[in-house]
Image (cartoon, rainbow, N blue to C red):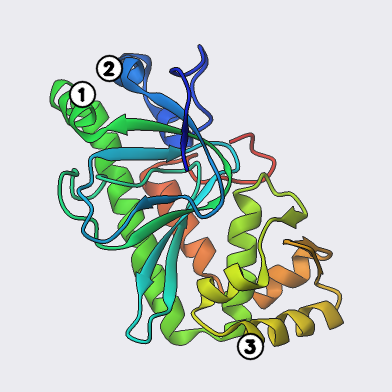
Amino acid sequence: MLTRQNGTSGERPFNNLLRRLNDADFALIAPHLLAAEANPNDLLYSPGDNVETVHFPCGPSLVSYMVASEDGRDVETILIGREGAVGGIVSQGNLPAYTRIIVKFAGPFVRLSVNKLDAAKSKSRTLSNIFARYADCLLAQIFQSTACNAIHSIEQRTAKWIISAMERTDGEDTVPLTHEQLATLLGVGRSYTSRVIQIFKAEGTLETRRGSILIRNSDLLRNRSCRCNEAVKSHFEEVLRGIYPEPGRGN
């Protein structure tokens, strides 16, 4: 469960979208931001929930969108980290949620009422423009994920998801990703994921530890991956330069 804290610190939260705002625009929403801590698998929205709050992952926190399939399995579509936000971004909120949105990696968040955000947008064209641009990037991410699931192999997509998680955890060699979580990302059974992981382990790309994956050779991992992450990053750079997390870039 998200644990509410009393407001935010004097510094801006470690969320790239919020840090992109100019001082005047940030001042419009700063008094309404609420800090929170989240645990893995905390539920932010279920299908049908009224979207009343925007959640901004901070630092290494990571959120996933999950769509239920006909056989009862949940398939993850995209991951959102400190480059963005979830809830009321595309629809402007106060509409039913379509997917389940859960916390993938624990950590800090800040929350903002959709109504407060809409009021701030009405006062500032530049603030509204930033969020419209992010909504465009989010849709591009969804489109790319759809294409990736249709045309790329399980091995390519496994490497892509691990890299995506690694980039959002400051490029650390160890990411808190379990076999079960990876299977959900891929939309396959755990046994299939385990076979792919064994292939990667045999070639020296990674190792597994309890509750995490250790990347031994990031170059091999990138060679194994499709180029979907790069396509998404390229669009982010064109539309909202500097927002997408890059190891070593300090964002």
Which kind of residue does numbered mark 2 sit on?
Answer: Leu
- Is residue 9 depicted above or below 78 in this figure? above
Q: Quadrant of the C terminus?
A: top right
- Rendered image: mark on residue 102: none
Q: Residue furthest top?
A: 10
Which kind of residue does numbered mark 1 sit on?
Answer: Ala
Mark 2 and mark 1 in contact? Answer it, CB < 8 Å.
yes
How far across and how far down the image is residue 125, in percent? 18, 27
Give whichever of discs 2 and 1 has the lower sequence position. Answer: 2
How far across and how far down the image is residue 41, in percent? 51, 55
- Rendered image: mark on residue 28: 2
Please identify the quarter of the rendering in which residue 170 is found: top right
Q: How many marks?
A: 3
Front: mark 1 or 3: 3
User: What residue appears at the point 64 percent right and 34 percent down from the top-left corner?
Assistant: 250
Please, what secondary structure does the residue beneath circle 1 have?
A: helix
How far across and how far down the image is residue 50, in percent? 20, 48
Mark 3, residue position: 192
Residue 147, can we see it? Answer: yes
Give whichever of discs 2 and 3 has the lower sequence position. Answer: 2
User: What residue appears at the point 48 percent right and 31 percent down from the top-left corner?
Assistant: 36
- Is residue 228 depicted above or below 139 in this figure? below
Marks 2 and 1, how far apart in space? 6 Å
Front: mark 2 or 3: 3
User: What residue appears at the point 40 percent right and 66 percent down from the top-left corner?
Assistant: 66
- Rendered image: mark on residue 120: 1
